[in-house]
């Protein structure tokens, strides 16, 4: 009996539905699930985990791709292990080299100390033996004791100089005679200059500003030097030069006095930030203390933001941002 038109349509739809379901199942089994495994493997490899291999039992393009990824991960892991071993070997070699350099430095230092202290020790030993043996006249005992003290002070200075040389020390502001610095420098380079047939000489004689002003000023009084050292110098070297020139021109004695300095240097007083520790009611939040300190430093350096940032140990952009928060950015 022939099938009706409705039965044919129903059978066709059923066949299409079965084929679609089979296609979906095959896609999930042969494509979707392998792709998910490949994705997870790529994520683990991106995170540095190359230990777990990807296992796909199918022998198609997905299987070949999984095998290639496993091979790539194995090579990367091997390269990482090799790089780590080489880095460890380099670090060990550097440590060994540093240890050898330290030993060499210690040896040189010990030899230098023995050489420098040997002579004072011999003097001290000889004088002490004379005193112990009683072969020194009573009038010479004090002289021998003084010699022993002098040599002991000499050894102390030698050791102190070695310690100062080995320690890291920051720059310190102080007074220096530039003419003496120049002359010492010329003494150091003069042998090399003579070999090169170059003549070097120091033409300056006496304080430069005093010669230019026609004054017989030889230096600074202790009080004037203290004021100069305590001033913040927002104008840097140019301001210092102008202040010295003015002071020398006004000086009436052989030394620059406090009254010869500019008014702002005479009246300058270093600012200090005090933090109360006894009365809890006077304590302020950290943000308030930071704001006060930054503004005080800026005031102390005459509004020089570059110098203030250097004193505070922060960048200029950070300082500008904080000043904008405080409403004190200025010009």
Image: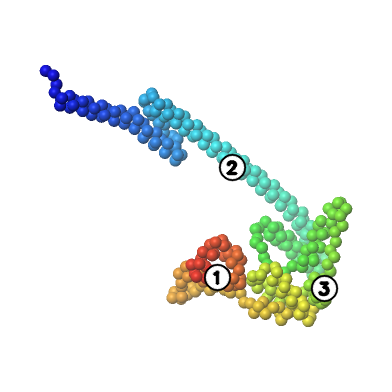
Tell me the quarter of the image containing the N terminus.
top left
- Mark earlier in primary sequence (1, 2): 2
The answer to whether residue 36 of the structure is visible from this angle is: yes
All told, the count of numbered labels is 3
Q: Position of residue 153 (x, y in %)?
A: 74, 64
Q: Nearer the viewer, mark 1 or mark 3?
A: 1
- The residue beneath circle 3 is 211
Q: Are marks 2 and 3 in contact (CB under 8 Å)?
A: no
Residue positioned 70% across, 71% down in the render: 240
Q: Which residue is mark 2?
A: 91
The one nearer the camera, 68 or 200, is 68
In space, the residues marked 2 and 3 are separated at their CA atoms by 60 Å
Q: In the figure, 187 relative to 271: above or below?
A: above
- Judge depth for marks 2 and 3 and give the one in front: 3
Q: Nearer the viewer, residue 193 or 315?
A: 315
Across and down, in percent, residue 12 comes to 21, 25
Marker disc for residue 330: 1
Where residue 156 sits, quadrant-wise, is bottom right
Q: Kindly identify the residue that appears in the image at 65 percent across and 78 percent down.
A: 264
Relative placement, left or right, of 322 versus 198 is left
């Amino acid at each position: 009996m022939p099938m009706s038109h409705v039965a044919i349509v129903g059978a066709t739809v059923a066949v299409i539905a079965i084929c679609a379901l089979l296609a979906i199942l095959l896609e999930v089994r042969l494509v979707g699930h392998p792709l998910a495994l490949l994705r997870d493997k790529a994520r683990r490899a991106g995170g540095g985990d190359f230990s777990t291999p990807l296992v796909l039992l199918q022998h198609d393009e997905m299987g070949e791709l999984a095998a290639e990824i496993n091979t790539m991960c194995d090579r990367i892991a091997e390269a990482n292990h090799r790089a780590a071993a080489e880095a460890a070997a380099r670090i060990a070699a550097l440590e060994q080299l540093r240890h050898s350099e330290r030993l060499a430095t210690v040896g040189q230092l010990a030899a230098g100390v023995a050489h420098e202290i040997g002579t004072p020790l011999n003097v001290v030993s000889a004088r002490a033996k004379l005193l112990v043996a009683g072969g020194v006249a009573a009038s010479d005992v004090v002289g021998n004791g003084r010699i022993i003290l002098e040599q002991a002070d000499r050894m102390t200075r030698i050791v102190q100089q070695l310690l100062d040389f080995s320690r890291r020390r920051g720059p310190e502001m102080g007074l220096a005679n530039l003419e003496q610095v120049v002359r010492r420098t010329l003494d150091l380079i003069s042998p090399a200059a003579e070999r090169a047939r170059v003549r070097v000489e120091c033409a300056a004689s006496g304080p430069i500003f005093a010669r230019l002003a026609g004054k017989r000023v030889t230096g600074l009084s202790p009080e004037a030097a203290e004021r100069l050292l305590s001033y913040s110098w927002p104008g840097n070297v140019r301001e210092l030069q102008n202040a010295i020139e003015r002071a020398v021109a006004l000086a009436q004695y052989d030394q620059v006095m406090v009254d010869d300095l500019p008014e702002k240097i005479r009246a300058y007083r270093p600012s200090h930030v005090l933090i109360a520790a006894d009365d809890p009611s006077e304590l302020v939040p950290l943000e308030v203390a930071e704001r006060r300190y930054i503004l005080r430093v800026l005031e102390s350096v005459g509004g020089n933001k570059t110098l203030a940032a250097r004193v505070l140990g922060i960048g200029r952009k950070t300082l500008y941002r904080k000043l904008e928060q405080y409403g004190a950015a200025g010009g």
